[in-house]
Amino acid sequence: MESRSQPPYKSSSFSTATTRDDGGRTREVDRNFSLGAVRDKGGRDLHHHHHGHGGARDREQAIKEEDEQEEGDEGAAAGHGGEECGVPDLAALSAEVDAFVAARQQGGDAAAVTVTDATLEKFASAVELLVARSEGVEDRWAAEASGEPSALLAAITRTAALASALGKAPAEGGGGGSKHTAAAHRVTAVLHRAMAFLEEEFHGLLEDPRVPKPASAGGEPGAAHEPDRCVLPPPVTQVSADAEKDAAAAAAAPPYPPETVDRLRAMADAMVAAGYATECTQMFLVARRNAFDAALQGIGYEKSNMEEVVRMAWEALEAVIVTWTRAFRHAINVGLSTEHDLCTRVFAGRHAAVGRGIFADLARCVMLHMLSFTDAVAMTKRAAEKLFKVLDMYEAVRDASPVVEAFLSADENSSSGGGLAELRSEIAAARSRLGESAAAIFRELESSIRADAGKQPVPGGAVHPLTRYAMNYLKYACEYNTTLEQVFREEQHAAAAAGHGGGHGDNNSNTNTNPFAAQLMEVMELLQSNLEAKSRLYKDPSLSNIFLMNNGRYMLQKIRGSPETNAMLGEAWARKQSTNLRQYHKNYQREAWSRVLGLLRDDGAITVKGHVQKPVLKERFKQFNAAMDEVHRTQGSWVVSDEQLQSELRVSIAAVVVPAYRSFLGRFAQHFSAGRQTEKYVKLSAEDVETIIDELFDGNATSMGRRKT
């Protein structure tokens, strides 16, 4: 097969190559594959290595020419094994090597199967030449039609087995001994150089998962390669929703096609069997760690150090937490499963333990760095608005535990579980830290309510800002009711284990009681007490009751509008709140309207012995008109924002006042002379009173006189 020139971006397998360790440092890999090591029995060089970028075709031509020049010197060996043109017959030599290796591995009579130094030399030279000629061949790693590994990989594997067998040769006089010392060095040197070549190929395949097409498939040389060898999208700091979805989908897909996995597995088998497990696992771990990090960057996650997080403004940190939570869930639910599957497929069979160890290290390295972010967030200043994002993080970490447990269970008989066991411990610790932080942040709401002791009443008796904030906060908190129950229950258990009883809220220590529900009730009682204290800031008792009605109604509506909150507080609390509201309503009507209604009653002062006392009647009408003007002016500025409550108040007032006034008019209006006297004292009709009442509680402070003009 005609060899193709190499892509310009790929360094020669015979030069110094670099890779990166998981700390980001460049690691140099030896690639000094000198062809000058092939010598004849007289010590003369058979061929020389050509450095630079001349390509495999030039090297093959040089090798062929030098082989032809040395044909005469190789005449004696040419008949052995059927070699032609001085090129060793690798198949025949391999058979001898296999027999020798098998005898050594069986540990029987070593003298029964021997191998000469000449055979070892020729085998080493043949393997060396095969490797050199394979560099420019794109399908050099393709498996044979029978499913066996490629000839190149089989040769490298056989060389590793031979080097091991020679290393176990018996001492001088024991059937082989020191006569193979020089040949053993030669085979070992070829093995090292071949493994250096294999390392670079393994690294390149990890970086670029595309399997090159055979030359017979057509296309331009190097067409299977592209300059960009990155497996995953480049890091981004901000991505659109579509781009983020695409990146997540790409990260969730298998990182390598099946053909690539098969070749990686064959290469890994050869490297581990040859004693290069450290180099193999290091390259695999670094490549997959970089790919994992790139996948997280592809969905917007950027690493932050603790100092940066602690100093970050909340608005910025909130956005980082959202991204972290999404990335962490992706890493646990998609990333780790993908990497576990890959490790299992590449390191299979007798090398499965190696794969489990790589996965454990990868999982630990990636996840521990992400978990360190939880430490930084827990160290930031506690504030009530941080609760929900901390709970999001808590849930993500909590949900990671079963995933890691599943991996641990699958590898329970493996010694590689140490990394996963450490990860399990760190996840438990992170969950505990976030739970403690969430509980403390929730109690910041209690502190805020206690600290809100303002001396200025809310104008018009409207809903207090504290009430709005607290109830909306509790509504969202109750959407996390299951999580918060876990948080407070874990806090109880931790306090009990430490010998501190129930901790904060000792009345919550009953294990049959939902500890979050108890905390919620405590906050509601605290808020109610605070509002009652604030109601006393109003000089008008009627307005105090309007304030309590407004706030109580707002609380009840918020709770009834949230199934979670309603379920947490229970129907008993709602009934109690409704009872309180009815009492506030009665108190308001008594305080605000008892004097007005008293003016409309004949208490014995208007009618004396059957005669109407006109001066008293005139004064009553004057007082009633003034009282209604005052009501309109003051209560018109009061605010009842809940339309249903506003309507209920107006209807209840009108139901009492309008009939009483209509009756009063019907009984006493005729005692005034028609004309100016009636206009002077009877200024309001029953309909006018209804209109005044319908204009109450809308926040408009006007007197009747100004209203009429």
Image (cartoon, rainbow, N blue to C red):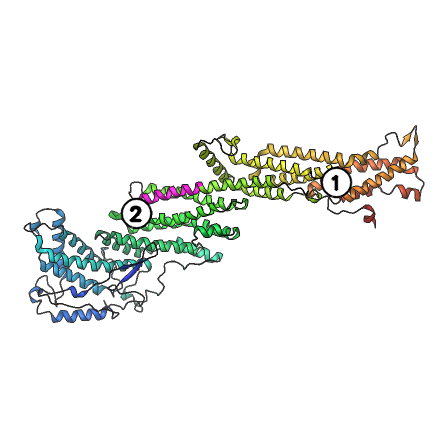
Q: Is residue 504 magenta?
A: no
Magenta residues, start to end: 415-432
Q: Residue furthest right?
A: 673
Which mark sits nearer the N-terminus, 2 or 1? 2
Say whether residue 95 is left or right of residue 692. left
Residue type at mark 2 is Gly
The spot of residue 414 in percent (x, y) is 29, 42
Q: 618 or 556: which is nearer to us?
A: 618
Taking the spot 18% from the left edge, 71% from the top edge, the residue there is 62
* Residue assigned mark 2: 357
Dot 2: element = helix
* Residue assigned mark 1: 650
Taking the spot 25% from the left edge, 71% from the top edge, the residue there is 54
The spot of residue 373 in percent (x, y) is 44, 48
**Quadrant (top left/top right/bottom left/bottom right) for the N terminus:** bottom left
Q: Quadrant of residue 461?
A: top right
**Measured along the vertical axis of the image, is residue 73 above or below residue 323?**
below
Taking the spot 90% from the left edge, 43% from the top edge, the residue there is 680
Residue type at mark 1 is Arg
User: CA gap, disc 2 to disc 1?
Assistant: 76 Å
The spot of residue 654 in percent (x, y) is 77, 38
